[in-house]
Amino acid sequence: MKRFFCTRFFLLLLYVLCFISISEAVQPGSYRVTEVNDGDTVTIRTSSFIGIPFKTERVRLIGIDAPELKQENWGRKSKRYLKKLISDNDWVVRLELDVDQRDKYGRLLGYLWDNRGRMINELMVEHGHALLYTIPPNVKYDERFITAQKRAQSKKVGVWHKGGLQKSPHQWREEHPR
């Protein structure tokens, strides 16, 4: 009887491990955000087993560059705003991928959408909490980001406010390498 139980347990474990490895590739769809890492990166839960989170992935929002967390108070403001957008959506977002699906750090690259059909990446730029940041070939929504940044600049919101961000996040990273 004990041997029968061990064999069944082993087969069940083998099945679960095979299922998880088959479903490794993240597909477009709805995901629960488990953490907002900064103003342009979140962590999503990509799989679970009996309600227990099993695998998470970091997602870098395509088309935007938010101030770094150590970059004056703008990095913290950007992270707070992204957290508000996601929490207002009950921590569930729809993920859309583009041509390149991962960056050099292994993060997924994606567009995040809320339950009202608004692109979160675009909202970050439009409200002055991130800058336009284009890296081909992921250029599907570039025109939307250009328009959003022009609106933010004309309204002088967020980093575009008088006395706003002194250096772009890209410039800041060059001066403060990891």
Image (spheres, helix red, strand yellow):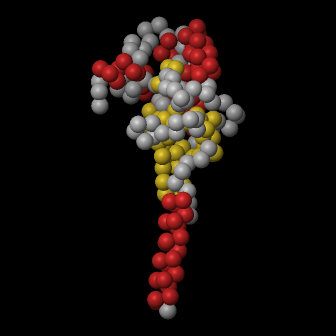
Towards the viewer: 6 or 137: 137
Residue 42 in sight: no
* Residue at point 53%, 70% (across, down): 15
Residue 56 in sight: yes
* Residue at point 53%, 74% (across, down): 12
Location of residue 150 with respect to 78 vertically, above or below: above
Location of residue 116 with respect to 123 vertically, above or below: below
Task: Return the x and y of residue 17 as percentages of the image width and height.
Answer: 49, 66
User: Extreme right residue here?
Assistant: 116
Location of residue 11 with respect to 47 vertically, above or below: below
90 sits to left or right of 12: right
Task: Return the x and y of residue 21 as percentages of the image width and height.
Answer: 50, 60
Task: Return the x and y of residue 134 as percentages of the image width and height.
Answer: 51, 23
40 sits to left or right of 126: left
* Residue at point 55%, 63% (across, down): 19
27 sits to left or right of 107: right
Towards the viewer: 83 or 150: 150
